[in-house]
Image (cartoon, helix red, strand yellow):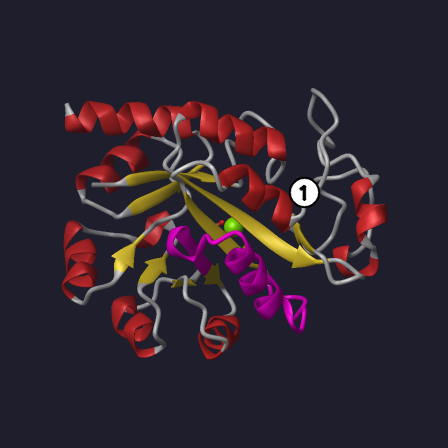
Amino acid sequence: MTYIWAHRGASAYAPENTLPAFGLAIAQGAEGVEFDVQLSADNEVVVIHDETLDRTTDGSGFVKDHDLNALKRLNANAGRSGATARIPTLAEVLDLFAPTAMHINIELKTSIVGYPGIEKLVLEQVAAFGLAERVVLSSFNHYTLHRLQLLGAGAEIAALFTDPLYQPWKYAKDIGATAIHPDVSHVTSRAFVAASHAAGIKVRPWVADTAADLGRMISWGVDALFTDVPDIALAVKAEHLG
Ligand code: G3P
Ligand code: MG
């Protein structure tokens, strides 16, 4: 059974990685959510995809060079119509999802800016909300995954990667991850999914938005998929189950 996880919230319909996009994901019935975290100048964990502010906000420069107060003054709904939205903190987002039953995937964006200490800060917040059992921690930076394990993560660890790795479930097992998060185009066959499952490794591709990708991933039995259109993905899933 494939769970539908909202990628950066219901990001096709609302500004990515903001409370409106997350609220919409809940309203649409998404079974999980994915979002990205970076660190402000005053060491607050904030939810934003890019290392810089320019694409998604009316600010500019690096997230790491702005304190939370400055980040909170920005409009995170830049370039789209609709209401102003703010960059949320990790705590605000966890607070929103805590009362739901949804899976929560926190992607630590440490590949470009290292953000020393971010792993500990994230784990502290997950523990403070008592959410370890529902949280999946992922990163393209596998040193971050290793640090999370050294810190006694408690939550599930998933390995993100961009290239088409050969039998990535073997590598995932080797580094202590329990899931792989590959690009959807690199999940090339039903046998790929089956071999990963045989090794005890879950498969969650990103990003499946088209009917073709959604149908193929669901029929191959991936454990979850990331989508910008949770409403459409849920409809495809219902069709498949029906
Ligand atoms: O975590 C899945 C996906 O979000 C990874 O890529 O660039 O959208 O964060 P990106
Ligand atoms: Mg992401």
Q: Tell me where residue 234 appears, x and y as whole percent.
A: 32, 27
User: Tag 1: residue type?
Assistant: Pro
Q: Is residue 56 visible?
A: yes
Is residue 131 located in the magenta-colored stretch of the structure?
yes
Q: Is residue 138 above or below residue 11?
A: below
Q: Secondary structure at mark 1?
A: loop
In the image: residue 174, left or right of residue 155: left
Q: Is residue 111 visible?
A: no
Classify residue 44 by image quadrant.
Answer: bottom right
Q: Looking at the image, which is closer to me, 75 or 156?
A: 156
Q: Tell me where residue 108 appears, x and y as whole percent.
A: 55, 60
Is residue 75 located in the magenta-colored stretch of the structure?
no
Q: For mark 1, what is the residue?
A: 88
Q: Residue at x 18, y 59 (%)?
A: 197
In the image: residue 178, left or right of residue 92: left
Q: Looking at the image, which is closer to me, 149 or 35?
A: 149
Q: Residue at x 65, y 71 (%)?
A: 114
Q: Looking at the image, which is closer to me, 199 or 70?
A: 70
Q: Tell me where residue 95 appears, x and y as whole percent.
A: 57, 42
Start and end of the magenta stretch?
Answer: 110-137
Q: Residue at x 41, y 66 (%)?
A: 154
Few, some or many C-alpha atoms within 10 Å of disc 1 (few <14, some 14-19, many ≥20)?
Answer: many
Q: Quadrant of the N terminus?
A: top left
Classify residue 81 by image quadrant.
Answer: top right
Q: Is residue 144 above or below residue 131?
A: below
